[in-house]
Structure formats: C-alpha cells, structure tokens
Image: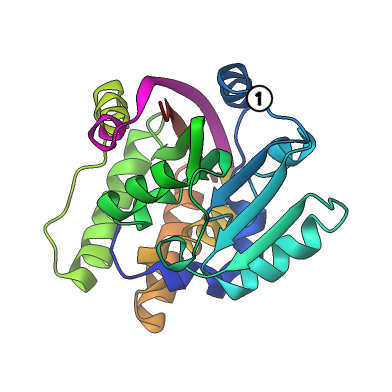
Amino acid sequence: MIVKGLEWTFDTVASAYEKFRPGYIDELYKMIFDYTALNKSCRAVEVGIGGGQATLPFLKSGCNLTAVEYGEQFSKLCQEKFRKYPNFSVITGKFEDVNFLDDTYDLVYSASAFHWVPESIGYAKVFSMLKRGGVFARFANHPYRAKDNLPLSKEMDRIYSEYYYKFYNKKQETPAEYNEEQAIQRAKIAEKYGFIDIKYALFYRTRTFSASEYCILLGTYSDHIAIEESIRKEFFSKIEDAINNYGGSITLYDTIDLQLSRKP
C-alpha cells in the first residue's frame, strides 16, 4: 500500500533499508543495456537512489551518473558507498524540485521510486531532460508474501486487520500478486507524454527471511514506519510470533516489472 506524503520516512531507516531492501537481477540490466548502450561519454540520472540497490551496474558502464535523492541520510550513505567512482555524484532534493538541463541526458532511470513523483510532472520532466533517442527506464519490485504457507498468510491478514488497517481506518485489502496487465498499463503511461518504442518485461525471484529479519524489512516500508511507535512495536511483535509459530521463516515471491521508452 502506498500512502502519499510519506517520502520522508525512508530516510529515518537508511541503513536498514540499504541492508534489507533487495537489488535487481542480471536479466533486467541486460534488457536495459540491450535497449541502450552506455559508455563514458553518456550522461545518466537516477531518480530516488535510496540505498543504491540499482546503481552499481550503471556506474560500471562508465557513464557519468547523477543521482537525485530526497533523503539526506541516503545521500550521505551513497556518497560513501560509491566514493571510488569518480563518475558518480548525488544531489539532495526532490526530483520535481531539482533543475536539470533540457536535451542533455542519454538515460534517466528510477528503481522502485518513481511512484512518489506526480505522474504529469515526472514524465514531462524526464522527456525534457533526455536527448533525442534518450531512454527512460522505470522498474520496481513487488513482493507477495507467503503463498507457500496459507495458514501463516491468513494469520498475518488477521494481524494486519487488528493493527495496520485499524490504525489507518481503512477497509482491509486482499493481498494480490502484481500481474502482467498492471505492467502493461504502467508501460502505456509513457505514450501519453510523447515517448515511443515502449517495451516491458516481468522478472521473478524468491527471498526467504527469519521472523526477526522480516520485521526489520517491514520497518523499511513507509506506511509501516508511519504507524505510531507503541502500536508498531506490538504489531511487529505479533508478526514475528506468527512467523515463528508457522515454520520460523517467511518467503516473499517477487515480481519485478521493467518499462522502457525512448524520446523520439
């Protein structure tokens, strides 16, 4: 669930986010680099670098990469993390507020972050920034929990009803796996803003966590961070107990979607 206005929350847990949020798979990068060749003469921008989970393959291409990141702690973390790369720099600020030159960049990309940028502002800005033939790559990870353990999933639904949905005073939603139709609809957004040669792909993987690890991961989600602390602690304790009572570990089934588009 995405709750608008919570972009600030991630920066409060930067080190845990960097450790527990996943990177992306080789096949995804291969598709991007097959779509657009990068070298030392290219200029790229990453929108919302976070803990730098998606950054290294682009840096290794030799391109001059500028990251824009809202969180000060994330900016400092990534400056240190990629200090050995002279082709890397980071600007602290919201993407929509930072000034970039028009018709300048070969690639703009964003990994699990572009949904925080208002659509009409974000796509139009990326289009203006890109050179003719420049590429926009948007990708994101969509985890689906415990489909191999239905008793655990049902118990977690009950706990979410008691804590999460009660806190937000919202009707409980049934968890669902991200699907191809959603990926297609997301890919089509770029057409509205003048992009062409649109492509998309889905990639899959699993990740398994202990009960304590999973609760640390939950603590990197904006809508979970924003829950009042005493409620959040009890909520996470119940989740941890449930996982330990139903096998001691939990598996996430990730769907990663990639959308590629080009400025004519």
Q: Is residue 183 magenta?
A: no
**Element type at mark 1:** helix
Q: Farthest residue toward the right? A: 84
- Figure check: 167 above or below 255: below
At horizontal 30% and vertical 21% (from top left) the residue drawn is 180
Residue 235: name its quadrant: bottom left
The answer to which of 110 and 225 lies nearer the viewer is: 110
Relative image position of residue 20 (x, y in whole percent): 61, 53
Give the colour scheme of this rendering: rainbow
- Figure check: 210 above or below 40: below
- Chief SS of the magenta region: strand
Q: Dot 1: few (<14), some (14–19), or many (≥20) neighbours within 10 Å?
A: few
**Mark 1 sits on what residue?**
26
Q: Is residue 197 magenta?
A: yes
Residue range in magenta is 189-208
Please state which amino acid type lies under the numbered disc 1.
Answer: Asp
